[in-house]
């Protein structure tokens, strides 16, 4: 597949503007050079956002919000519907760009664009369901109800590993709620953000909508700080590491703003004696090596009962021998590169820590070089036998390293091991035992935001709210009632009499 053709279809050039309010752009800042981890080649440059231009963006967003909030929600949904259709037309070139700039497989790139399409479909239906509720008043001749109103500007800070989907999860819902959005993508995948902005900008122009409904800013953490400290942005939705999330939460909380956080995961699959081993292997291997282990839902730990430990271990090791590593645009390969050489360094350091802390590496890792690996971002997926208390096991390493942990006795013991980390995003159990499955899903089971039975930890559907507990941040994006975070809630009481009774029977006669 031709990279240049895909770039052309997306309207990308060698030099691209990274600050935009829709169809208006600003180009004052320095350039980000986007190199592909696939082959190390320069894809293009993106200009960054100065503080001066950032303020112009926010002013435009403020002005747009005053108009956008008055547009009926189903009409806002119509704009999102058109956006989804445009994504269908450009699914392949955008999928190619995601794969080439981020390094995930082409199939995963297409899957990510499909997530964008799916959330648009979800949002369109939701645009006619932004319902409140009515309730009886304790005062005669009174009626009470609750309703939801647009919140304002939603600031979105996204990560490199899902360079387009996370933005769409937030924007599609925020737009139908009547909000406008300002997006700061990862500086590691800036071209994906420019491509997305161009797509929605065309839709906004075709519908004669004002500038500022969809805004883009680019740069490093300093641009993120502009947003987190800005009282004009009532909600910040941030995706990234737990360390970053704590900084964001502190900054936004200090000004009493709202934050929606999607942070680290240290996800485990529990494998009980009643598990289907073949199914377990499929779920564990994809979860561990998909996106080269750079998903927040990637499988990091496999907690296996001692009775079947050797069988599962040997089956997983055997499966790893079949993994093909190489150019992610070649669909015969399973695993592409890490995002950059800094990620490779962290991966190599993690392997050293495993050895120092007493772990037994049973599938050797390491950096790949030679023909096809010139970017020096390709690594071997690794498996280590370890113990739950190892410091490295307690951490999230954003790389294809899988830890095998052994448990004995009841499934309760496995659940305790699983829950004994600071992260709480995704979890899974492999079992055909109904009691074990239900225990895992109970209040005393998994403490994660996502708990699966007989599927892996990786991946999520649009219909369910996505997010986790503890150091994962507690936020929820995408399905269910996640739309409520993008709106302000209001309680209304209406008196349709000529009398004024007070609540709780209070008398105040004049």
Image (cartoon, helix red, strand yellow):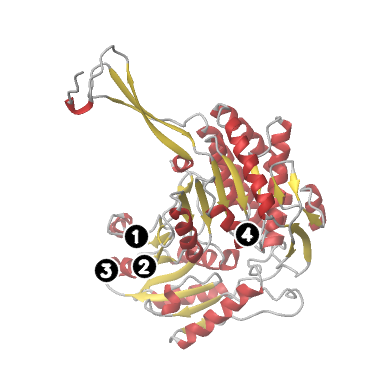
Q: Is residue 442 above or below residue 407?
A: above
Report the residue marked by disc 2. Answer: 418
Q: Quadrant of the N terminus?
A: bottom right
Q: Nearer the viewer, residue 388 or 475?
A: 475
Left or right side of 340 for 492: left
Which element is circle 4 on? loop
Which percent across, then down, holds residue 265?
46, 64
**Label 1 near label 4: C-beta < 8 Å?**
no
The nearer-to-camera label among 1 and 3 is 1
Q: Nearer the viewer, residue 275 or 477?
A: 477
At a point 48% along the width and 83% down the height, the residue shown is: 354
Q: CA distance from mark 2 to mark 3?
A: 13 Å
Crowding near pointer 3: few (<14 within 10 Å), some, many (20+)?
few
Between discs 4 and 3, the one toward the N terminus:
4
- Measured as percent of width and height from the top left, residue 339 is found at 64, 67
How would you rate the neighbour count of disc 1 (Cα within 10 Å): few for under 14, some for 14-19, many for 20 or more?
many
In this rendering, position of residue 289 left or right of residue 505: right
**Distance of mark 4 from mark 3, alpha carbons?**
43 Å
Residue that numbered label 4 is attached to: 186
> Could you tell which of marks 1 and 3 lies nearer the N-terminus?
3
Determine whether label 2 and label 4 are within 8 Å by CB: no
Q: Are marks 2 and 3 in contact (CB under 8 Å)?
A: no
Q: Earlier in the sequence, mark 1 or mark 2?
A: 2
User: Is label 4 or label 3 in front?
Assistant: 4
The reply to whether dot 1 and dot 2 touch (C-beta < 8 Å) is yes
Q: Position of residue 373 (x, y in %)?
A: 72, 75
């Amino acid at each position: 597949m031709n990279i240049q053709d895909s770039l052309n279809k997306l309207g990308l050039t060698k030099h691209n503007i990274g600050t935009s309010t829709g169809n208006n752009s600003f180009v004052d800042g320095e350039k980000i050079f986007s190199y592909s981890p696939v082959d190390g080649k320069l894809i293009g440059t993106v200009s960054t956002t100065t503080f001066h231009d950032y303020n112009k963006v926010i002013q435009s967003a403020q002005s747009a919000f005053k108009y956008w909030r008055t547009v009926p929600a189903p009409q806002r949904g119509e704009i999102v519907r058109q956006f989804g259709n445009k994504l269908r037309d450009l699914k392949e070139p955008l999928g190619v760009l995601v794969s080439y700039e981020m390094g995930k497989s082409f199939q995963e790139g297409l899957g990510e664009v499909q997530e964008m399409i799916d959330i648009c479909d979800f949002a369109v239906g939701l645009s006619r369901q932004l319902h409140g509720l009515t309730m009886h008043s304790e005062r005669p001749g009174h009626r009470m109800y609750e309703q939801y109103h647009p919140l304002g500007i939603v600031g979105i800070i996204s990560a490199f590993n899902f360079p387009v989907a996370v933005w769409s999860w937030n924007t599609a819902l925020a737009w139908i709620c009547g909000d406008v959005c300002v997006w700061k993508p990862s500086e590691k995948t800036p071209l994906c953000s420019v491509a997305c902005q161009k797509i929605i900008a065309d839709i906004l122009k075709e519908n004669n909508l004002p500038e500022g409904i969809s805004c883009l800013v680019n740069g490093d953490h300093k641009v993120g700080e502009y947003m987190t400290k800005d009282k004009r942005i009532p909600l910040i939705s941030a995706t990234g590491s737990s360390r970053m999330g704590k900084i964001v939460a502190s900054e936004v909380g200090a000004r009493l703003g709202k934050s929606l956080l999607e942070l680290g995961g240290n996800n485990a699959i529990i494998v009980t004696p009643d598990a289907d081993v073949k199914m377990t292997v499929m779920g564990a291997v994809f979860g561990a090596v998909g996106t080269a282990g750079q998903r927040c839902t990637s499988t990091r730990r496999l907690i296996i009962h001692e009775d079947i430990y050797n069988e599962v271990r040997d089956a997983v090791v055997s499966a790893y021998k079949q993994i093909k590593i190489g150019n992610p645009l070649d669909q015969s390969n399973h695993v592409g590169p890490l995002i950059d050489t800094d990620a490779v360094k962290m991966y190599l350091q993690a392997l050293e820590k495993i050895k120092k802390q007493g772990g037994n590496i049973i599938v050797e890792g390491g950096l790949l070089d030679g023909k096809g690996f010139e970017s020096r971002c390709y690594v071997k997926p690794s498996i280590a036998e370890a113990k739950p208390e190892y410091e490295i096991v307690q951490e999230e390493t954003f790389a294809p390293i899988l830890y095998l942990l052994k448990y004995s006795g009841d499934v309760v013991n496995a659940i305790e091991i699983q829950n004994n980390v600071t992260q709480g995003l995704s979890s899974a159990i492999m079992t055909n035992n109904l009691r074990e499955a239900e225990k895992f899903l109970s209040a005393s089971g998994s403490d994660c935001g996502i708990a699966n039975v007989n599927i892996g930890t990786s991946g999520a559907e649009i219909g369910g709210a996505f997010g986790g507990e503890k150091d994962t941040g507690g936020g929820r994006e995408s399905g269910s009632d996640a739309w409520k975070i993008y709106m302000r809630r209001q309680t209304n009481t209406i008196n349709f009499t000529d009398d004024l009774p007070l609540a709780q029977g209070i008398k105040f006669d004049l």
